[in-house]
Amino acid sequence: MSNQNQLAMVKKDTVDVVANKVKEFQEKGELHFPAGYSPENAMKSAWLMLQEIKTSKESGYKPALEYCTKDSIANSLLDMVVQGLNPAKKQGYFIVYGKSLSFQRSYFGTMAVTKRVTGARSIDAAVIYEGDDVEYEIHNSRVTDLTHKQKFGNQNKEILGAYCTIVQEDGSTYIEVMTKEEIEKSWGQSKMNPQGEKSTHNKFPQEMAKRTVINRACKKFLNSSDDSSLLMEHFKGTDERLEEAQLEEELSDNANKEMLDLEYEEIPDEEQAPEPQKEPEREPVSSGGPGW
């Protein structure tokens, strides 16, 4: 089968299925998109990007559309569209974990969903540097009345923390504050080696600190709402599926490593053991399409 024919079959079983499902949601009145959002254009952009995505080195840099399950491809597209996001606007990314394709929101995407669900007027973040004067009060376990005084030049000093302020429709505010230690702990959960010398986190710590606190503020703010819409279902489901895919990949890697270790124990010291291969092995979710 030619590559073009194989892509056409994958597209039929994923993009076309998602398009029909979205249309069904709209006809039932369960899904409403923001003004100017085109699900068709978003999926076209996503499909073009998906054709360029490869698996990891351990999996042989295989095309994601050939390697990942069709269920996971379709579900990642559905997560993207229901949230009204477009990868062409840097609102999210597609990432391969084992045989699963997952859609991960960027902080731009998280802000877009937050504004759409809550009607928030603005979402802004600032970094706290050594020498800054920051004071706030806590009422009912929430940060309020935050004031931040900063002298010019403090931006060149050590980062002590960051905060995000969400201004709601009625003018009230929601504030999330994070210390440097909390921010770095969050970075430590990333698979992109944020502590590396050439990492984006190391090159632009101020901007990455803002992104981290914005993500936390938006997620906490949204999760505290009582919105039970299809949008919120997929907002929360996206994170859950991403965590599940990461966990399954980690378990698969560890299992493969343990098997390799057992095999290498029987190799004499004078022999050179082959390079371990960490090819993740997972059973497909199903062959009958997305489990909606």
Image (cartoon, rainbow, N blue to C red):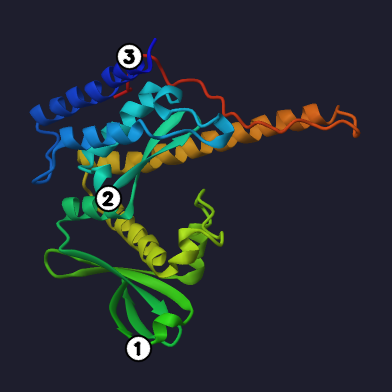
| Alpha-carbon span between mark 3 and mark 1 | 60 Å
Badge 1 element: loop
Residue 168 visible in rendering = yes
Instruction: Report crowding for label 2: few under 14, some 14 to 19, many 20 or more residues within 10 A (C-alpha).
Output: many
Instruction: Report crowding for label 3: few under 14, some 14 to 19, many 20 or more residues within 10 A (C-alpha).
Output: few
Position of residue 253 in the picture relative to residue 163 (left or right): right
Q: Which residue carries the number 2 mark? A: 109
Q: Amino acid at mark 3?
A: Asn
Instruction: Identify the image quadrant of the C terminus.
Output: top left
Number of the label disc, if any, that sits on residue 141: none
Q: Position of residue 23 (x, y in %)?
A: 13, 27
Q: Quick one: 196 or 117, which is closer to the camera?
A: 196
Badge 3 element: helix
Vertical position of residue 196 compared to residue 124: above or below: above
Q: Position of residue 263 (x, y in %)?
A: 79, 26
Vertical position of residue 281 compared to residue 200: above or below: above
Residue in the picture at 39% in, 26% down: 65
Instruction: Identify the image quadrant of the N terminus.
Output: top left
| Alpha-carbon span between mark 1 and mark 2 | 32 Å
Badge 2 element: helix
In primary-sequence order, the first of circles 3 and 2 is 3
Residue in the picture at 34% in, 33% down: 50
Mark 3, mark 1: which one is toward the viewer?
A: 3
Q: Amino acid at mark 1?
A: Phe
Q: Position of residue 207 (x, y in %)?
A: 38, 66
Q: Which residue carries the number 3 mark? A: 5
Q: Amino acid at mark 2?
A: Gly
Q: Which residue carries the number 1 mark? A: 152
In primary-sequence order, the first of circles 3 and 1 is 3
Mark 3, mark 2: which one is toward the viewer?
A: 3
